[in-house]
Amino acid sequence: MKGIIGKKVGMTQLFDEKGVVVPVTVIEAGPCYVTQVKTVETDGYNAIQLGFEEVVERKLTKGQKGHLQKAGTPTVRRLREVRSDDGDPQYNLGDVIKADIFQDGEIVDVTGISKGKGFAGGVKRYGFAGGPKTHGQSDRHRAPGSRGAGTTPGHTYPGLRGPGHMGNEQVTVQNLKIALVDAERNLIAIRGAVPGPRGGLVLVRASKKAQKA
């Protein structure tokens, strides 16, 4: 499966062939280096490990530097794995993957870490309706309400929706369409929104559902 690591630059807009404004997210995709090749014989499955974002050696541990020296790649600090299937392009250690592996109009899945929003109540976190704004309820408008039975079982079950930490978790947005690929500057413009803040790390892969279809 095709994939590349990138960094979210931000959002802008493009005009399609009909002159309609299209909101897009610009991603600085690559260059990435193949730092490890996994096979069924050695690891039980086929995959490649990609490295992104070159840094000075002193920012890496000895184990990380040894791993990259074995692959013969520059010192990169972001490593991600992309599963490969039969019929996918074959890569070797040290190969460079750039944005031109994708083309305009392709359908992709984008994985990133969503924006952290801290502690949030049930209304913001899950869309609870809250309580009535009359009949003397001056301070219960955004309360989650009752959580379950009384005497039996006498407690609430774990996993129920309620107030808590919101965001800052891995999110995958599927079936996004590539609007533009700028191979010279390693930029990919994807229609719609992508998880994470500006500067956040994202993994762009060929869409699983589109391939099955």
Image (cartoon, rainbow, N blue to C red):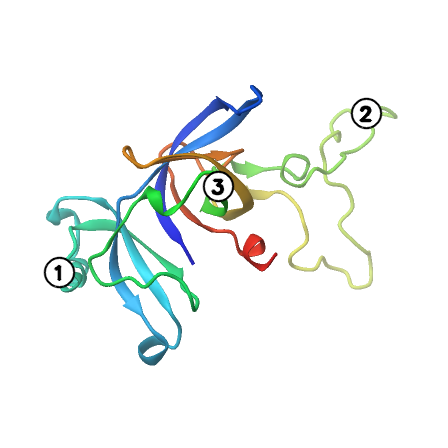
For marks 3 and 1 on the same chain, the one whose residue lies earlier in the sequence: 1
Disc 2 marks which residue?
A: 133
Q: Distance between the residues labelled 3 and 1?
A: 32 Å
**Can residue 166 be seen from the camera position used here?**
no
Taking depth in this image into account, of 171 and 30 the one nearest to the observer is 30
At horizontal 21% and vertical 62% (from top left) the residue drawn is: 93
Q: Residue 197 carries which label?
A: none
Badge 2: few (under 14), some or many (20 or more) residues near its Cα, within 10 Å? few
Q: Residue 69 carries which label?
A: 1
Quadrant of the rendered structure where residue 145 is? top right
Q: Residue 114 carries which label?
A: 3
Residue 17: percent from left, percent from top: 53, 24
Task: Report whether 162 appears left or right of 96.
Answer: right
Residue 42: percent from left, percent from top: 31, 78
Considering every residue shown, the one lying at the far front of the view is 17
Q: Which of marks 2 and 3 is in front?
A: 3
For marks 2 and 3 on the same chain, the one whose residue lies earlier in the sequence: 3
User: Is label 1 in contact with label 2 (beta carbons under 8 Å)?
Assistant: no
Quadrant of the rendered structure where residue 121 is? top right
Q: Which of marks 1 and 2 is in front?
A: 1
Taking depth in this image into account, of 165 and 17 the one nearest to the observer is 17
SS class, disc 2 = loop
Could you tell me the amino acid type at mark 1? Answer: Gln
**Can residue 18 be seen from the camera position used here?**
yes
Q: How far apart are marks 1 and 2 (CA)?
A: 65 Å
